[in-house]
Amino acid sequence: MTSNQTEIQQRRGDIAARLEELKADALLISSSANVRYLSGFSGSNGFVVLTATETHFFTDPRYDIEARTNISAKVHVVKGSITPKILEVAKRKKLKRIGFESSWTRFDEYTRMKDGLPLGFSLVPVGRIIEERRMLKSANEIEQIRRSVLLNSEAFARSLKRIRPGVRELDVAGEIEFQMKKLGAEKPAFETIIAAGAHSALPHAHPTGHKLSANELLLIDMGASLGGYCSDMTRVIHLGAPPKKLRELYNAVLEAQLAGVNAVRAGITAGRVDQVVRSVMKKHKLDKAFVHSTGHGLGLEIHETPRLGRMDQTILQAGMAITIEPGAYIDGWAGIRIEDTVLVTTNGCEVLTPTSKEFVTL
């Protein structure tokens, strides 16, 4: 058994140990990220049924060879709808109370399951118990995230050489994603955000055919997926010398970002980190221009718990991977966001992102 398979077995054991607490005989996992977490399967159609003593994996014939070769579970390859096969196993194993991921299960899947169960069987909503465990990364997961972060930064550095007036936002996005793939990424962790000039005031702007001008701001938010694990970074650059007012905006956001990084440590709440960042933004009269949370967890998905927002009382623990990404957005003019991926440690945090936060001019 490989070290990765051993780690997956440990995850299953930890989750199975909670079945009694959840008043369930089994847990049906349908979220693709959670299926991968508990099986290693990265395809588009897989389900896991976890009991106290067994793991059942369900997929379709496209993944037959992959599943039987790589997944340490009782593999069921099903033609057509998988739901009847899951129900068949549940009945045969007398799994009368089946926990399901209420945050992920589609209503039509729930209805088919509910209608197909015999009298005396029931479905039990269990929420995000797997996501809770995923917040704490193992040494192997941390290494995967670290490698993803380094790849992402290298793709950024290579792409800077191709940015010049006349290049479209779409061209920049394409170059970044090409460099990621060239460096070994599976795919971007999310749609790359490239936003020039006033377009940068849209926090989740989509790249367009707009051509960069000789004196323009450019916001780049990018992340890579490597070995299934995500990275996330935002930097802004300026073609030509940025005006004083823009430098002042940049410096204010940078001050808030550094304050957030300095606040991160095991034992502090996610909401408290957000408060620290917002207090700096408020000092610069930018509190109303900061329209999103300070950051988020990341791992197998680009957005995981915890969410570093005002109301989040999650206590940060060593081994969590999160982002710190304050931003200020001025409609019709500009948006500045600075983002690093950081690892929570006992006494603080380790900034994994190596890319300089200097306001780059090209």
Image (spheres, rainbow, N blue to C red):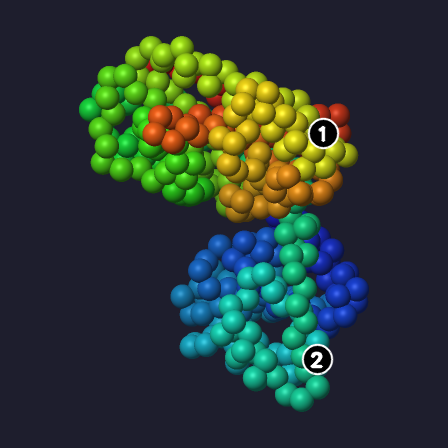
Residue sitting at 49 percent across and 55 percent down?
42
Q: Secondary structure at mark 2?
A: loop
Check disc 1 and report its element: helix, strand or loop: loop
Name which residue type carries label 1: Arg
Q: Is residue 292 above or below residue 109?
A: above
Q: Tell which of 195 and 285 is nearer to you.
A: 285
Residue furthest left as drawn: 166
Amino acid on which the number 2 mark rests in the picture: Lys
- For image coordinates 68% across by 71% down, the residue present is 124
> Mark 2 and mark 1: span between their CA atoms?
43 Å
Residue 207 appears in view: yes
Which of marks 1 and 2 precedes in the sequence? 2
Circle 2 sits on which residue?
96
Res 181 label = none
Residue 189: quadrant of the picture: top left
User: Which residue in the structure is indicated by mark 1?
Assistant: 265
Q: Residue at x 44, y 60 (%)?
A: 44
In the rendered image of this protein, does residue 126 appear above or below residue 224?
A: below
Report the quarter where the C terminus lies. Answer: top left
Q: Is residue 6 left or right of residue 296?
A: right
Residue at screen point 73% across, 62% down: 16
